Amino acid sequence: MRAPESSSGAFFVVRKTERKHNKSIEKKKEKGKKIMKNRQKKWKSLGIVVLVFVIGYGLLWYYMAANVTRIQEQNKEYAKSFAAQSAERIGSEFNTALQRIENSAYLASMGDSSALIDVDTLKELENHTNFDAVRYVDRDGNNLSSDGQVCQIQDRSYFKKGCLGQVA
């Protein structure tokens, strides 16, 4: 075959095998580009998953740290409250013990005069006991209060049972 004559350029003959080879290279390049795009998508997806995991872990850590701090503060408040209640309880026990000692000392100081119970004696007993009022009842049912009032209770069932040693 004869090539046409040309004065200004060159004429190239491309063989079929070269065209196939060029197409094969182009296909490989396109395939490589697709593979790269897929790899980029995979890495991008993996990066997003890792980022979400790191953010989630950070939020979880922050919540746990805040919760630990809150629990520690709450425990401090419980400890303060418990200490205050314990101190109050101990103070109450000491006051009760002191009151018992004072009551015993007062009754011991009365000596043999305890057979003579009058209004003044009842008032002194009120001052040396934890009770708001003190009353004295004799065997005849005469009920004497510290303010001087007297009433009869010999007909009441609790007085009768008490004189017999029974629980009213």
Image (spheres, helix red, strand yellow):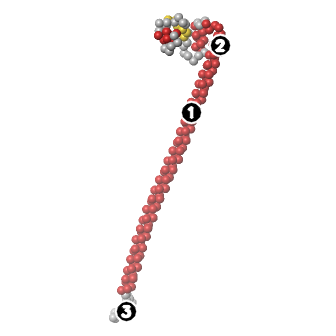
Q: Which mark is residue 7?
A: 3
Query: Seen in the image, is 67 located left or right of residue 107?
Result: left
Nearer-N-terminus badge (3/1): 3
In this rendering, the answer to whether 39 lies above or below 151 is below
Q: Position of residue 131 (x, y in %)?
A: 55, 16
Classify the position of the N terminus by image quarter.
bottom left
Q: Which one is in front, 159 or 31?
A: 159
Q: Which mark is residue 82?
A: 1
Disc 2 vs disc 3: Cβ atoms closer than 8 Å?
no
Identify the secondary structure beneath mark 2. helix
Q: Which one is in front, 81 or 116?
A: 116
Q: Which one is in front, 124 or 153?
A: 153
Nearer-N-terminus badge (2/3): 3
Query: Mark 3, mark 1: which one is toward the viewer?
Result: 1
Identify the amino acid type marked 1. Answer: Phe
Q: Position of residue 111 (x, y in %)?
A: 65, 10
Q: Position of residue 60 (x, y in %)?
A: 49, 50
- Badge 3 local density, few (<14 within 10 Å), some, or many (20+)? few
Instruction: Determine which residue is flagged by label 2.
Output: 108
Nearer-N-terminus badge (2/1): 1
